[in-house]
Amino acid sequence: MRSELFAQEHHETTTTERFTLQNPWLLKVVLGPDVLAAKGAMVAYQGQASFTHEGSGSLGKFMKRAMTSEDTPLMRVSGQGEVFFADSAYNVFVMRLENDAISINGRSLLAFDAHLHWDVHRTKGAGIMTGGLFNTLIQGEGHVAMTAHGKPMILDCSVQPTYVDTQAAVCWSANLTPNIVSSMKMRSMLRGGSGEALQYAFHGPGFVVVQPSEGPPMPDESEDSEGRLSSLFDG
């Protein structure tokens, strides 16, 4: 049988590395220690693997994930073999944490070492007017895989203030504390505005990873759910 499909570029990359990109859109994780991944992200596996729902671990963490846009359901993957992860053919990239931390837009989270510590945090200045903006903080020593809608770009925030559309920001240095700012004047808001008016404002030693897309639409938050978010995190 002959086909261009059998060219070497389409074959699995053989490696003992824990996290390996098979191509720009597909991640392979070698099992041993458990891995946490976004539910539905597994596209194939070899060997013996089990997939179980991963609870939040605490009531507070559960409430924050259940009531925010960071509610990316997680699954725990255990066993021996290799598991392949992807998300809608988005670009995948991997970061190795070395006893440090990264703040991630939850929609961009693909997989990470299960021993890493994680929690959901509210972005400073993200109130009812923004519908509530949250991010997932992951810290420790291990691998984190994320996705970007298109080829990601890193911006240095240490030289001058950096402003990024809230849906285009993939992740950023955990030591940075972004604020929510608006470039829209009140007159424009009264006429009906767009999401372009809201940005994360970064400034300080660190970086932000930006995707060349605003990604999938943000889920709508009802006035009732916004009120519950405000009372939960501001009270």
Image (spheres, grey):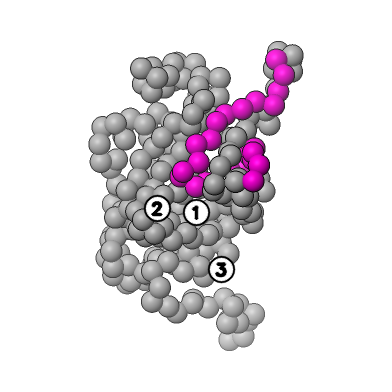
- SS at circle 3: strand
Q: Which residues are magenta?
A: 159-186
- Callout 1 amino acid: Met
The question of residue 182 being in magenta is answered with yes
- SS at circle 2: strand
Q: Residue at x 31, y 35 (%)?
A: 61
In the picture provided, is 187 more to the left or to the right than 22? right
Residue 23 marker: 3
Q: Residue at x 53, y 35 (%)?
A: 178
Query: Which numbered disc flags the more N-terminal residue, 3 or 2?
Result: 3
Name the residue carrying label 1.
146
The question of residue 227 being in magenta is answered with no
Percent of width and height locating residue 64: 36, 31
Rate crowding at label 1 as few (under 14), some (14 to 19) or many (20 or more) other CA atoms within 10 Å.
Answer: many
Residue 170 marker: none
Q: Mark 2 against mark 1, which lies toward the viewer?
A: 2
